[in-house]
Image: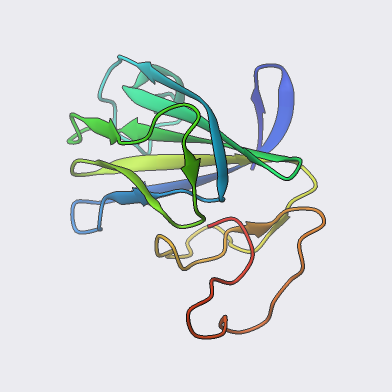
């Protein structure tokens, strides 16, 4: 879904978690954490579009090899706490644990408009293993990665 962040256009993928989902969050891309901003807020239902702006959240920017991804950990109606365990300047691996959200919540991932999105509305994704998109210049690997390796793509 198209979205605007700080005046720039992005593709936004929203991942909704219910009380039965695993709420450990993983970095969608390997790289360096360039910013992490916590915002106090409300606890609207995560399905409500206004929650992306009004709810408690952490907004994090990860950068690597000329690519940048922004993601938001957004608290929901029942989630009363978002936890981010990394610091600005830390290096993270693709799929590495970076925090959690308690109970139901939402994760928004903002990608450059040139990204080749691999998921569609209604898909169920798994942290650290589902490929959300390929960034421009990344090779599209088919099937599973060789044992001990992670397939390319934002996760």
* Residue ID at (25%, 24%): 43
Q: Position of residue 37 (x, y in %)?
A: 43, 19
**On screen, residue 97 above or below 142:** above
Q: Residue 12 in the image: x percent, y percent?
A: 60, 41
Q: Is residue 151 above or below residue 58?
A: below
- Residue 94: x percent and y percent? 51, 56
Residue 76 in view in this figure: no
Q: Residue at x 41, y 54 (%)?
A: 96
Residue drawn at 19 percent across, 58 percent down: 20
- Name the side, left or right, on which 67 lies relative to 121: right
What is the image's colouring?
Answer: rainbow
Q: Position of residue 113 (x, y in %)?
A: 76, 42
Question: In the displayed structure, does residue 82 sit left or right of residue 155?
Answer: left
Q: Nearer the viewer, residue 9 or 147?
A: 147
Q: Residue furthest top?
A: 40
Image quarter in which the N terminus is found: top right
Which residue is painted at 77% across and 68% down in the image? Answer: 139
Q: From the viewer's perspective, tell me whether residue 84 is left or right of residue 72.
A: left
Q: Please indicate, yes or no, whether residue 84 appears anywhere in the rendered image.
A: yes
Q: How many marks?
A: 0
Q: Identify which residue, 62 or 119, lies in the foreground.
A: 62
- Quadrant in the rendering for residue 7: top right
């Amino acid at each position: 879904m198209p979205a605007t962040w700080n005046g720039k256009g992005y593709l936004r993928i929203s991942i909704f978690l219910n009380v039965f989902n695993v709420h450990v969050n993983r970095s969608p891309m390997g790289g360096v954490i360039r910013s992490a901003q916590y915002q106090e807020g409300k606890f609207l239902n995560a399905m409500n579009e206004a929650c992306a702006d009004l709810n408690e959240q952490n907004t994090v920017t990860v950068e690597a090899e000329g690519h940048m991804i922004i993601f938001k950990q957004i608290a929901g109606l029942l989630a009363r706490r978002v936890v981010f365990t990394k610091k600005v300047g830390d290096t993270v691996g693709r799929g590495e644990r970076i925090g959690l959200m308690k109970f139901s919540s939402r994760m928004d991932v903002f990608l450059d408009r040139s990204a080749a999105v691999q998921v569609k509305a209604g898909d169920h994704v798994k942290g650290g293993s589902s490929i959300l998109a390929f960034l421009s210049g990344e090779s599209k690997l088919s099937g599973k990665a060789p044992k001990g390796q992670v397939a390319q793509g934002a996760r």
